[in-house]
Amino acid sequence: MMLHPFMGIEQWDRIGLSVEESAKRLQRIAYVDRRCMNLEAGHMTARPEYEVKGALARFTWQDAEFYNQFRNRCKQLRMSVRAFEKCPDDALDRLMTTILESSNTLNLLVALFEVLKPASINAVNRYLSEAQPLVDEPTIHLLQHQLSDRKGQMVWGEQAIAHFMASASGEEVESAERWKQYIQALLQAAGGIDGCEEQIPVNPSLIVETEPFQLPIASTRDDRFQTSVVKMKGMTFEDNDEGRFLQMMLSRYFEMSPAEGVAYVHFSTEGKPWSFYYDTARHCWDEVRHCWFGEAALRSKSYDVHAIPNWTGWYDMTSQLFNRDEAYTHLTIAIEKAAMKYPPGKREEWEFCRDVVKDPLMTTFQDFDWADEVVHAGFGQKWIIDELFQGDNVKALDAAEVTVAKRAVYMDSFEKDGNVPPPSRFAGNY
């Protein structure tokens, strides 16, 4: 029996797409992925629903991965990085800016999961159906693997829309439908994600007036939660191993606020190299995962996680106290790089769970938390010590100490004055 001459690759005689056409299509799909990454990070801070925050952080990371893959592939297809990173179509820019301006959670979900992301999947499938399978196997390979995550996003999005629709008022449903029609019209004006469809100008009657998107000045939570700017304010713990273990689970659970802080930095920082946004997308998602470590551990011990005052202080001081460089310096240098010391540090936390309390689930969580924090300390080395302070470790550590002092004053004001001091007292210097 003769083996297949091309390892089972079919349609080997298809003419396919040229290198130029391939790169142009991939650039458009990638542009939408990068803008999705950015708006998902922004709305991660703005949407109050806890589960939506977590999902948007995950999608921020996944869409960053898609874009990075396309960026590398398009370089191989003779498209320069400078050309690749340009907006390929003003109509796509208008589409993505408008989705960013979604006024509520339901409208955002409808725009993403009933219009935009299905259109991206259609563009990927069209590329797969038209590409020459021998010459463009590297692209086909990465697109086929992307489809798994893209379809996974759709599963979550469809479930989320059904959840919100079930409790939406008639007016909210009507608003979401009008918004969907407008986003569809903007997509059609662009000729689809890949530009291969007929371009149809937007009917003026479909236009919905919007307001520019703004990051919230204070952390958002839905009405299941009580919040506290001061971490563990009013909580008491037994002075023993059990008390320390509870504090450790809570510390992981409270990492949604640092995740929001990273999302703030990611969304609001302009002019950095692509790898900064790639790293902070990963960092944001890691912090949400760490929050879920704590939530899973608490749930496994039958704690009611919604009865615990949820810490929001990290995002609030990021928004109200620090400038963006200070915010990322405080997280990566003052906190995460310092956590590499032993003892106590991340290694000792893992050993405590393994050897003292002997909790297998939390031992696994702390093991991976430690691994992630090593990565984050590396982000601090790259973006704070090497880039911001030109490799001067002493200056970086001094700057980190300044943020620690500023944080102490800020948190002390909440201890004295309550939960919400006037934001103008701690306006960041931008």
Image (tube, rainbow, N blue to C red):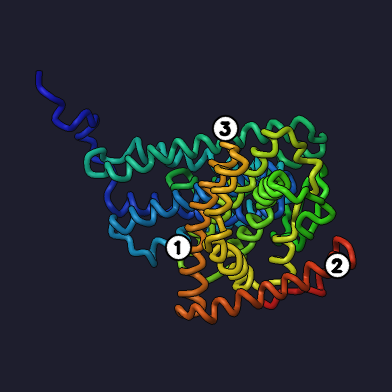
Query: In the rendered structure, which amino acid carries the disc numbered 1?
Result: Ser
Residue receiving disc 1: 275
| Foreground disc of the pair 3, 1 | 1
Q: Amino acid at mark 2?
A: Pro
Counting from the top left corner in percent of width and height, residue 118 is at 53, 38
* Sequence-first tag of 1 and 2: 1
Question: 10 Å neighbourhood of mark 2: few (<14), some, or many (≥20)?
Answer: few
Helix or strand or loop: what does disc 3 sit on? Answer: helix
Image point 71% across, 44% down: which residue?
A: 242
Q: CA distance from mark 1 to mark 2?
A: 36 Å
> Label 3 vs label 2: CA separation?
41 Å
Q: Dot 2 lies on which element? A: loop
Residue type highlighted by circle 3: Val
Q: Nearer the viewer, residue 102 or 141?
A: 141
Of 6 and 292, nearer the camera is 292
The residue to which callout 3 is attached is 155
Around disc 1, counting alpha carbons within 10 Å, would you say few (fewer than 14), some (14 to 19), or many (20 or more)?
few
Q: On the picture, is 185 further left or further right than 131? A: right
